[in-house]
Amino acid sequence: MTTAALAGKAVIVTGASRGIGKALALGLARAGARIGIAARSEADLAQTAREIEALGAECVALTLDVTDGAAVGAAFAQFAERLGGLDALVNNAGVEQVCASLDVEEAVWDRIVDTNLKAPFFCAQAAARLMLKRGAPGAIVNIGSIASQFGIPTAVPYCASKHGVLGLTRALATEWAPLGLRVNAIGPGYFRTAMTDAFYEAPGWQAAMLPKIPAGRFGELDDLVGAAVFLCGDGARYVNGQILYVDGGLGAAL
Ligand code: NDP
C-alpha cells in the first residue's frame, strides 16, 4: 500500500479562491494534506473549500488580504490551531496590471509589489514563527514566474516583484535552513487564468507565443501540482533555495 505524499501534513495556500492557487489547493488535498485556504473573495473561497471537502480532505477557509500584515499573523495562527499544526505554506496570491512603464503610477507599483513581494515575505515570516514554535521542520513554496528570470515589456512592476520573489526565496533559504525550514519557488510559464485571460484573448498573442513553448502547448493548471507536492513534501528534504520552472521548456528556449 502506498501512502499519500502529504499524508498528515497541514498546508496553507494563499490566493486559493481561483486559478493556480485553487488548483494547487485541490492537488495538495488529493496528495493527502489538510488545507488552509485564504483569499479576499469569500464566495469563491467557500466554493474551493466545498471542492476540497468533496475529496474527503479537511479544509479551513479564511478570508484574508495578504497585504494586511496584522491580519496575516492572526489568520495563520488560526489556521495552525484549527488544522492542528502547520507544515507548509504556498505563497501564491498575486496580482498583475499591464501598463507601459512611462504611465505606471505609484499606486499601481505599490499594489503589485505589496501583493507579490512584501506579502509573501510577511506570510513566510508568520508561517515560520508557527512552524518553529512547534519545533517541526517546515516548507515554504513561493510562486514566482518566468518573470523571475526574464524581463517582459509593460510588466515592469510585476517582473521586479517576481525577480524579488526569487531573491526572497534564496535569502530566506540560506537564513532558515539551519532552523530546519526549506524555502523554494515554482516558476510557472503561461497558464490561462483570470490574470492572463486578456493575453489569450488579444489578437495574435497565442499564435505568437505558442511556437516559443517547446512542449507545444500552454500550461494546464494541474501541470503545477506535482511540483508543489514535491516541494512541500519530505521527498524534497534536501532541496532548498531553488526555483523549479514549470513552463513546458519556455525559459530554456528563450
Ligand atoms: P488569478 O488572478 O486567477 O488568482 C490570483 C489569486 O490571488 C486569487 O485567488 C486572488 O483572490 C488572490 N489574491 C490577489 N490579491 C490578494 C490579496 N491582496 N490577498 C489575498 N489574496 C489575493 O491569478 P493566477 O492564478 O494566474 O496567479 C496565481 C499566482 O501565479 C500569482 O502569484 C501569479 O503571479 C502567478 N503566476 C501566474 C501565471 C499564469 O500564467 N497565470 C504565470 C506565472 C506566475 P482574491 O481576489 O479573492 O483575493
Image (cartoon, helix red, strand yellow):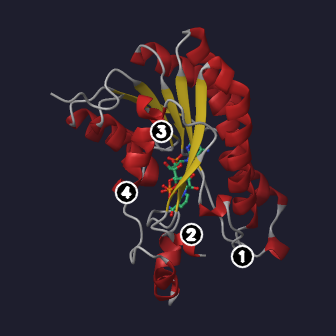
Horizontal arrangement in the rendering, residue 129 relative to residue 250 (left or right): right
Residue 228, above or below 246? above
Three-letter residue code for mark 3: Leu
- At horizontal 56% and vertical 9% (from top left) the residue drawn is 135
The answer to whether residue 235 shows anywhere in this view is yes
- Residue 183 is tagged as none
Q: Residue furthest front?
A: 238
Three-letter residue code for mark 2: Ala
- At horizontal 75% and vertical 58% (from top left) the residue drawn is 160
Q: Are marks 3 and 2 in contact (CB under 8 Å)?
A: no
**Mark 3: C-beta under 8 Å from nearest atom of ligand 1:** no
Q: Secondary structure at mark 2?
A: helix
Residue 154 location, quadrant: bottom right
- Residue 153 is tagged as 1
Q: Are marks 1 and 2 in contact (CB under 8 Å)?
A: no
Eye-nearest disc, 1 or 2: 2
The quarter of the rendered structure image containing the N terminus is: top left
Eye-nearest disc, 4 or 1: 4
Q: Are marks 1 and 3 in contact (CB under 8 Å)?
A: no
Q: CA distance from mark 3 to mark 2?
A: 21 Å
Horizontal arrangement in the rendering, residue 154 relative to residue 232 (left or right): right
